[in-house]
Image: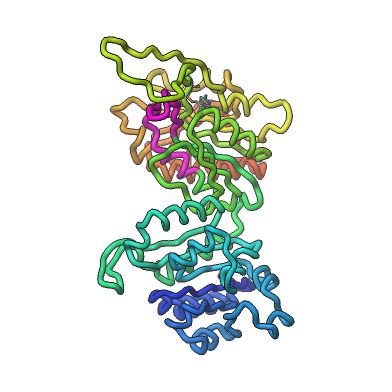
Amino acid sequence: MLAGKRILLIIGGGIAAFKVPELIRLLRSAGAAVTPVLTRAGAEFVTPLTIGALAGEAVHGALFDLTQEVDIGHIQLSRAADLVVVAPATADLMAKMAAGLADDLASTLLLATDKRVLIAPAMNVRMWQHAATQRNLAVLCGDGIGCVGPNDGDMACGEYGPGRMAEPAEIMAAIRAQLTDGPLKGRRVLVTSGPTHEPIDPVRYIANRSSGAQGTAIARALADLGADVVFVTGPATVPPPAGVQVVRVETAAQMLDAVMAALPVEAAVMAAAVADWRVANAGASKIKKVAGRLPVLEFTENADILATLSQMTTGRPRLVVGFAAETDDVIAHATAKRARKGCDWIVANDVRPETGIMGGAENAVTLITADGTEVWPRMAKEAVAVRLAARVAAHLSGAVRPDSAAASGGSISGKMKP
Ligand code: CTP
């Protein structure tokens, strides 16, 4: 239920605005109050009368309405809500948000608010897929703005593809998720993810096969529990999750800097596949092919980010979780790695190509802590993430861990504690 919650609902100008009356109806029957803001374009699709009647409140539209400035003020309007929802979020509104423009009431409220913002994009498929919109979406995700949809389907313009606004029931679910106080609410957590790229010269680099899927799922699962997630990601092939602060890096050195800049955090989950070495003699310009002469690359070691963080004497996160990607003697190598690096937990996985784990959809991990090893059954990376996030939440809140092995089919050796 959303009793006592107030939603500032910004209605953009798109045909999908026809779904907004139903969204308002659902919000009100869930107990929420709705403050509607109708953009000028939005008013071309739904009337202020319909919206006002359903919301049971005045509809705001113009920035410089002096009466309203005296009574309410746009700053206060932007702060009085528990959540700001933009539906439909048009390409134009998204561009304004990404650029920080404030040239009408809707964009001004979005810039002035100190509350979480959820957008439900809706537009023509080509507009959605346009590089500019995707760039804006990435910026908005990086700013911690939540996003629901768009869905695939037939569009009012006669085309087919992604661009349809999420259904009112889906938007309701996303609103509920945004407003739920999870066990990690108010806790700042860091997640590293993806591969790193180490340049050989300006056009070539050394990389690894990490897709970033596991780290992305972990960041999403932690955010779903209410954490403020800083997501430091190398060039991954999966998009970053919504609702987290995204910091994009390329090299291990940049990742180290980004991790240090993100501190302090209460917990750090280091899922990135960081390159151990970089090219010491990387070319400042493209290395040219010379017949009969092979280039000789010299390597130097990258700093170990996990070890650096784990061994901090002041400001160390309360919980540091590392990963161990191994191809043989998984448990023995991972246990030694945990001791060597000084992290609290290690999530060990077998990345031999035949397991299909690296770059795949599933993972089979063993959680290693000070008190034992816990073998988790093979499951979707999202499921591993949800389970790990729950363990992080239990640890940070100091709760004694329930007997999760019995409950979830894993096996434990040794005595476990959170
Ligand atoms: N890691 C890191 N910085 C590095 C290398 C690794 O922070 N320069 C972290 C990874 O994010 C992961 C853990 O260390 O959490 C283990 O990574 P892994 O590649 O399995 O181990 P390595 O230290 O690289 O050891 P090896 O390659 O010998 O197995």
Q: Which residue is drawn at the image coordinates 36% and 32% (left, top)?
A: 358
Q: Residue 295 placed where, x, y %?
A: 36, 14
Whether residue 223 is situated above or below residue 14 in the rendered picture:
above
- From the viewer's side, name the closer residue of 277 and 263: 277
Give the position of the C terminus as an image quadrant.
Answer: top right
Whether residue 148 is situated above or below residue 196 in the rendered picture:
below
Q: Residue 55 placed where, x, y %?
A: 55, 83
The image quadrant of residue 109 is bottom right
- From the viewer's side, name the closer residue of 233 and 30: 233
Whether residue 107 is situated above or below residue 18 in the rendered picture:
above
- From the viewer's side, name the closer residue of 64 and 368: 64
Q: Is residue 257 visible?
A: yes
Q: Residue 91 placed where, x, y %?
A: 43, 65
Q: Which residue is drawn at the image coordinates 32% and 63% (left, top)?
A: 125
Q: Is residue 52 magenta?
A: no
| Left-right relation of 160 to 87 | left
Q: Is residue 374 visible?
A: no
Magenta stretch: give its range. Answer: 195-218
Give the position of the N terminus as an image quadrant.
Answer: bottom right
Q: Is residue 216 magenta?
A: yes
- From the viewer's side, name the closer residue of 360 and 144: 144
Q: Residue 187 placed where, x, y %?
A: 65, 47
| Coloration of the structure image | rainbow
